Image: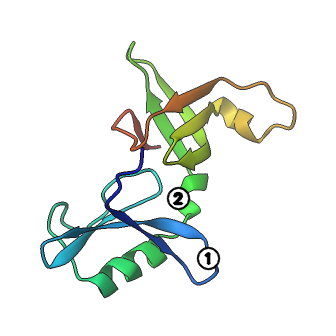
Amino acid sequence: MLPADWIEHRRGDGELVGWMLADGDGFRVYDLLGRERTPAPGDPIDWLAAEELLDGLGIGYLADRWTLHLVDGTRRPVRIAEASPRGVTVVADEYGAASAVGAVLDRYRLPFPVTDELSPH
């Protein structure tokens, strides 16, 4: 669930790229997975720097491969199918299966913001 005090930031074409949270005289930055992306986490930056950081981050990282760390210790390569404040859905991507047309894939629903159970591949 999206915290009520997060301020959305959209790039010039209207696409949502993340959020900012007021912290003292500055702002902390969060990506579309709800992960803090402030350069020094917990150390706020000014509004313009926060906007530039989110604009530079964009949304391309959502298309990358990720690793899902399951509770039994298993690690699965996954791709993000959906990311929103309601949750994040990932699909199994062993051997590029997520790109196969008509493939039936294992799906996992993760809470927002994601925890360290999902990490860059």
Labels in figure, total: 2
Residue reaching furthest to the bottom: 48
> In the figure, residue 16 lies in which quadrant?
bottom right
Residue reaching furthest to the right: 102
Mark earlier in primary sequence (1, 2)? 1
Mark seen at residue 61: 2
Question: Is residue 112 left or right of 37 when viewed as pictured?
Answer: right
* Residue in the foreground of this view, choosing between 22 and 37: 22
Q: Residue at x 66, y 23 (%)?
A: 106
Question: Is residue 3 left or right of 26 when viewed as pictured?
Answer: right
> Percent x, y for residue 117?
38, 32
- Label 1–label 2 contact, CB within 8 A: no
Question: Is residue 37 left or right of 46 when viewed as pictured?
Answer: right
> Percent x, y for residue 29?
32, 66
The colour scheme applied to this rendered structure is: rainbow
Mark 1 vs mark 2, CA separation in Å: 18 Å
Please, is residue 15 above or below residue 34 in the view? below
* Residue in the foreground of this view, choosing between 98 and 114: 114
Residue reaching furthest to the front: 4
Q: Amino acid at mark 1?
A: Gly
Where does the N terminus fall, quadrant-wise?
top left
Q: Residue at x 12, y 73 (%)?
A: 24
Q: Amino acid at mark 2?
A: Tyr
Kind of element beneath mark 2: helix
> Percent x, y for residue 46?
23, 83
Mark seen at residue 14: 1
Q: Residues within 10 Å of mark 2 (few under 14, many from 20)?
A: few
